[in-house]
Image: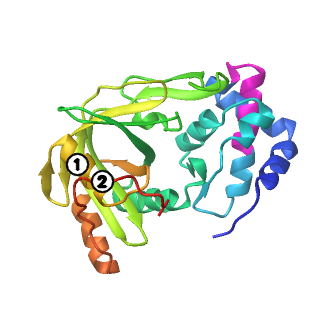
Amino acid sequence: MDEVGLEAFFAAYEAVEEKALAEALASWRELAGLGEAGVRLARVALALKALAEGYDGVAFRDWPEVPDRLGVFPSAALAVLGDEGLLVAPEGDLMGLLNQLVLRAVGGRDPILLDIVAVDDRGVLLWHGGEAPRSWALEGSALLPHFNRGVPAVRHLVLREGPVTGLRLTGRGFVCFGGRLDGRGAYIGVSGWLRDIVWSGEPLAPRAFLGRWLGAGMPHHLALGQGECVEALRELGRLAGLETLQGEEGGVWGTSWG
């Protein structure tokens, strides 16, 4: 693991060659359709690819400096890199990246990071700001302006139906759970409703799941992978000597990014 400052990213952004940029835009047609903003987003993606060479993934501080200096929100750039299999964890979430790498190693598919943003009697709404690869899309995707800043671009899609596995490793242990996305979405960005939740082998109602999550002191990102691999993750945890966190309902959001 190596840490570099954002200035290294901005230097790589400026160093992108015009030939490489033209080739990338020919491949990334959705970015090309955004005009000058798409050019800048393609530069962001190519800079991250250059910095990621030789590594399994990148935890990237994607805001506020990048949109402030470049006038684009880099979510769409992270999304097209995800299409190519490069994991870039947003918001500099290094532990989130580790969770994604574990999920991909166990499940064989590209995982994403999501927030828990709402709960009702049917499920838990999972959402994030538009970095997911197209393999997660229920019925296609679109690039839209950022929901707060109004600049290009986030990838908007509803998460496809089917079984999924959630994971969060921390310094104290780990949480893993299974469930099913039901094909509903909400809000601009990447979203889906999780239902039929099972936490470490125990079925939980949506509000009980939220209480467990909070009670375990989990940070706000969880890693989600397609398919059912809870038992494989639990076995991996046992082999690694990690505690399975059960969580006591009624907890509050922790301050640690774990």
Look at 74% across and 62% down and name the residue there.
4
Q: Secondary structure at mark 1?
A: helix
Left or right, residue 128 beside residue 5 = left
Q: Is residue 98 above or below residue 25?
A: below
Q: Position of residue 69 (x, y in %)?
A: 80, 36
Q: Residues within 10 Å of mark 1 (few under 14, many from 20)?
A: many
Disc 1 + disc 2, Cβ < 8 Å? yes
Q: Amino acid at mark 1?
A: Phe
The residue under the point 47% across, 64% down is: 258
Q: Which residues are magenta?
A: 32-46
Look at 86% across and 36% down and name the residue there.
18
Secondary structure of the residue carrying numbered label 2: helix
User: How far apart in space, not on screen, are marks 1 and 2 (Cα)?
Assistant: 6 Å
Between 171 and 56, the residue placed more toward the observer is 171
For the residue pair 71 and 155, the one nearer the viewer reads as 71
Q: Position of residue 162 (x, y in %)?
A: 25, 38
Question: To which quarter of the image does residue 135 belong?
Answer: top left
230 is higher (above) or lower (below) than 162: below
Left or right, residue 185 beside residue 238: right
Q: Which residue is mark 1?
A: 209
Q: For residue 202, what is the image quadrant?
A: bottom left
Residue 210 x/y as whole percent: 27, 47
Judged by its main secondary structure, the magenta piece is: helix
Residue type (three-letter) at the residue carrying disc 2 = Trp
The residue lying at 39 percent from left, 32 percent from top is 191
Residue 115 - label = none
Which circle marks residue 213 in the picture? 2
Q: Would residue 72 be seen by someone viewing this image from the given angle?
A: yes
> Percent from the top left, x then y, of residue 83?
53, 40
- From the viewer's perspective, is residue 186 above or below residue 201? above
Tell whether position 103 is magenta.
no
